[in-house]
Amino acid sequence: MINQNYLNLSESYLFSEIARKVKAYKEENPKADIISLGIGDVTQPLCPAVIEALHKATDEMAQSATFRGYGPERGYDFLREAIVTHDFRARGIDIDADEVFVSDGAKSDTGNFQELLSADCVVAVTDPVYPVYIDANTMAGRRIVKLPCTAENGFVPEAPTEHVDVIYLCYPNNPTGTTLTREQLKKWVDYALANNALIFYDAAYEAYIQSEDVPHSIYEISGAKECAVEFHSYSKTAGFTGIRCGYTVVPKAPSQPPPKGRSSSPLGGIRGGLHAMWNRRQSTKFNGTSYLSQRAAEAIYTPEGKAQIKATIVYYMENARLMREALTEMGFKVYGGKDAPYLWVSTPNGMSSWEFFDWMLHSAHVVCTPGAGFGPCGEGFVRLTAFGTHENTEKALRRISNRL
Ligand SMILES: *Cc1c(COP(=O)(O)O)cnc(C)c1O
């Protein structure tokens, strides 16, 4: 017998369909110089501080005195201490190194964490959404409630009208590139505490935040340590999509009894709560992130590393600014791109996402990502990314402008 829930997965044809259409167009028009503003991967190389750390760690592996075999499942202390110091204490957030679980990235952890929960939990996700949250919960047979994010509500989801047990939030958001302010995020923390719900907070794009009132971590909000698990990734922060490293923060369940009027803490549960359960799960099923990756991650917290990764983010965000300004000038309604490497662009003249995709490909030789591929509320939008080169970004914008 197989897990029948897999039959309920929707066919993920978005990126294969894009690839198919681009390939077909290229075959008919071999001279067309196609530029992709649909890239969901970073393109700039690893920074020098990371490369140096990788070389050094490799040399250590060549000597018996410094060779490392199996590492601690939760990650090496040197990295967990650096994370706590630079990502949390520097922002006045009290997170213990014991609450940090180093991982091979946020896709694995956002996908796997739901294993700790009953199949009866009801899960809320935003629409449009990063597909991993939906698919992982569909495989487990959970019911999913969608929270619409539209231009009308400013891409700020409203609380569900029925009880949900888990809410996935990703801010800055992929695909819309929009954010929640501290005040808007506080509403969700308050909702979770009042309704005994958990928040799974995906902070993969935290490093792109420019605005003062946008929180870098949900733990900036008081009460979040009682109801939220936070996922981080070095993929977009430091170009680690090939190297692989990230981490997840699982606060220890509060030792005091829950405040009056609340039955329990969402992070509680059996035998030491979700913290102990995740520790057990990871030490059983996860082999740890390689020593090399963890030394590479540690290097981005050095003064040189920090400056170097920031320079790359500035480079991408300059593309985002160019795109936002030029497209707005051309008359498009553009969202996001201020605190995220994504722009969410409303299609003109009531075109569908795929119609506009076709127009962009055929008329401007530019590839975008149809918003409808991220959920029904993505219809009528396309996602553009700032991960290209300056040169290609400018060229693509000139072409779109010329064809309008
Ligand atoms: C890219 C991305 C991640 C990061 O995934 P990794 O597995 O760390 O590479 C997580 N969440 C979202 C929404 C993303 O877009």
Image (cartoon, grey):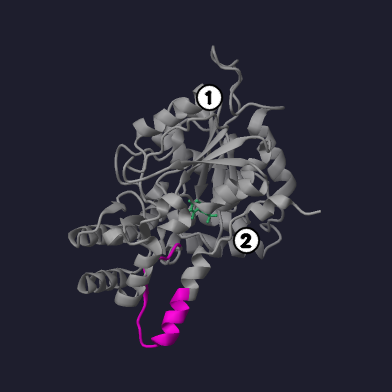
Q: Is residue 170 toward the left or the right of residue 258 in the image?
A: left
Camera-near label (1 vs 2) is 1
The region drawn magenta spans 21-40
Determine whether the residue tagged by mark 2 lies in a helix, strand or loop: helix
- The residue beneath circle 1 is 195
x, y (%) of residue 375? 47, 52
Extreme residue in the top direction: 260
Q: Earlier in the sequence, mark 1 or mark 2?
A: 2
Task: Reply above or below: 40 against 71.
Answer: below
Task: Reply above or below: 85 against 136.
Answer: above
Determine whether the residue tagged by mark 1 lies in a helix, strand or loop: loop
Question: Does the stretch in magenta take in 240?
Answer: no
Q: Note whether residue 338 is visible.
A: yes
- The residue beneath circle 2 is 60
> Where's the C terminus, which quadrant?
bottom left
Extreme residue in the left direction: 329
Amino acid type of the residue that numbered disc 2 sits on in the rendered structure: Glu
Task: Reply above or below: 269 against 233.
Answer: above
Question: Does the stretch in magenta take in 28?
Answer: yes
Establish whether ligand 1 lies closer than 8 Å to the Cβ of label 1. no
Q: Residue visible at 29% across and 43% down?
A: 211
Q: Is residue 12 toward the left or the right of residue 396 in the image?
A: right
Number of numbered discs on residues: 2
x, y (%) of residue 38? 40, 65
Amino acid type of the residue that numbered disc 1 sits on in the rendered structure: Asn
x, y (%) of residue 272? 68, 27
x, y (%) of residue 257? 60, 15
Q: CA distance from mark 1 to mark 2?
A: 50 Å
